[in-house]
Amino acid sequence: MQKLHNGGLISLTASMMTALMGAYALPYVVGALAKKPGLPLAGAGWIGGIHIWAIAMAACLTSFLLKRIPWRGTAIAGGMLAGICWGMCGLETRPAALIAYQIGAGIGGGCMLTVVSAVVAGTGDSERIYGRVYTIMSLAFAAILYALPLVQERFGSDSLFSAIALTVFAMTLAVTALPRTKVVADTAVNESLRDRRVPIGCLFVSMTLVYAMFGGCYAYSEQAAVTIGLSSSGIGWVFALSTAAATVGALLAVALGTTAGRTVPLVTGTVLAGTADYLILASHGVTGYGAGMVLYGAVTMFFNSYAYGAAAALDPQGRVVAALQGYSLIPYALGAGLIGTLTTHLSMGNVGLVCLLINIAGAVIVVPALMVADRRSQDFRSSRDALAGIPREVKALKS
């Protein structure tokens, strides 16, 4: 089992932020791309979306190579590739070249996402580690997303890409504290996933449903605010509160850990996520909408901690959680289109109800995976305690 010190926590957070930089800064990236000569807003949106898909595909594919690649070297190479590609986007105007650089930045981010997921899986305390990482990451991204528009206002729209590139290069320096190669629990070495295909499948199906609703609801959250008559400043305050609530959700995951197992926290979080979606889309007043956004922020990081923690428990070598973190970006990105299609046939209130019902279905589907994850964690702790007791027994015999 990998012991994680403060330097390791900083490296994990820096790696995660580098991997997800394009996803968090997507609205700014699309806006800056749209200011490129001859590139329409729709084209800018597609290029930004391609970046997200590149992260997802790279993370999924490299998860199969975790036994063969040097972890630290892969993370550093991924960070350097991402930084170079982000920087080149500021110098380029040709759509084909911009697509290539966005794909390159996504591939670099996906490689880092795979490594950080595998390292967390090897700690044996994934929920708390993810909670700590998400807490720091939420605060750091809040500062970055506040600063980026100021940089653009002073230096022009293309300065966004230079600022992102410099940030990525700086955070890549922190990756040196990651382990060079895989460090996993002894009981997990060369372990096959064949006997866990059903629970892993349940986890992926459930996450497909829930993350599609997460992404779709967030994409239409601003439109929902406009519909109820919320002012621009009011929308800004609500989104700020939602971001702050994300830190609370992450800290709750740190405090709770697996003391109550994984089933109750994740099922509860899934249903609450559906409730938040419903409140955001169906509310006719500021109170209900604001409550939904705050709940959405808190539940998101809490849910992520337990969802990825369950994946890590199903496979301490990190293959499942690395693939899931990359894969989850795909339904998240597709959710906006799904919700948009639903709004052409249903009222926003009914769309919110659909989101809630889909989340409830996701909560039911994931239960078998959580039961297996809890059982495997208990077996792992028993095995670890037994191994830890052997040196003490040998020492007692010698004395």
Image: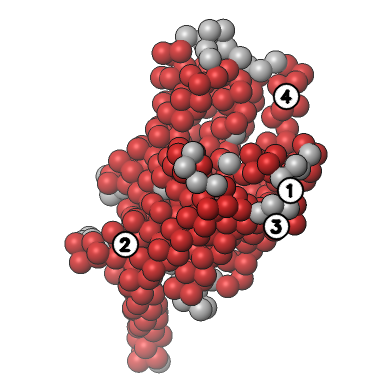
**To which quarter of the image does residue 315 belong?**
bottom left
Circles 3, 4 touching at the beta carbon (< 8 Å): no
Q: Which residue is mark 2?
A: 202
Residue beneath the point at 73% across and 48% down = 238
* Count of all numbered marks drawn on residues in the image: 4
Q: Nearer the viewer, mark 3 or mark 4?
A: 3
In the picture, residue 317 is in which quadrant? bottom left
Q: Nearer the viewer, mark 2 or mark 1?
A: 1
What residue would you read off at disc 1? 238
Alpha carbon distance from label 4 to label 2: 44 Å
293 on left or right of 257: right
Q: Give the structural element (helix, strand or loop) at label 1.
A: helix
Q: Identify which residue is drawn at 36% across, 37% down.
A: 58
Check disc 2 and give the amino acid type.
Answer: Cys
SS state under label 3: helix
**Vertical comparison of 5 with 112: above or below:** below
Disc 2 from disc 3: Cα separation:
32 Å
Residue type highlighted by circle 4: Val
Placement of 320 over or under 111, stated as above or below: below
Q: Which residue is mark 3?
A: 288
Q: Which mark is residue 151?
A: 4
**Which amino acid, by three-letter code, is at mark 3?**
Gly
| Image spot of residue 355 (x, y percent) | 49, 55
In the rendering, at what x and y percent does residue 246 appear?
A: 64, 55
Q: Residue at x 69, y 52 (%)?
A: 284
Q: Is residue 298 left or right of residue 44?
A: right
Among numbered discs 1 and 4, the one appearing first in the sequence: 4
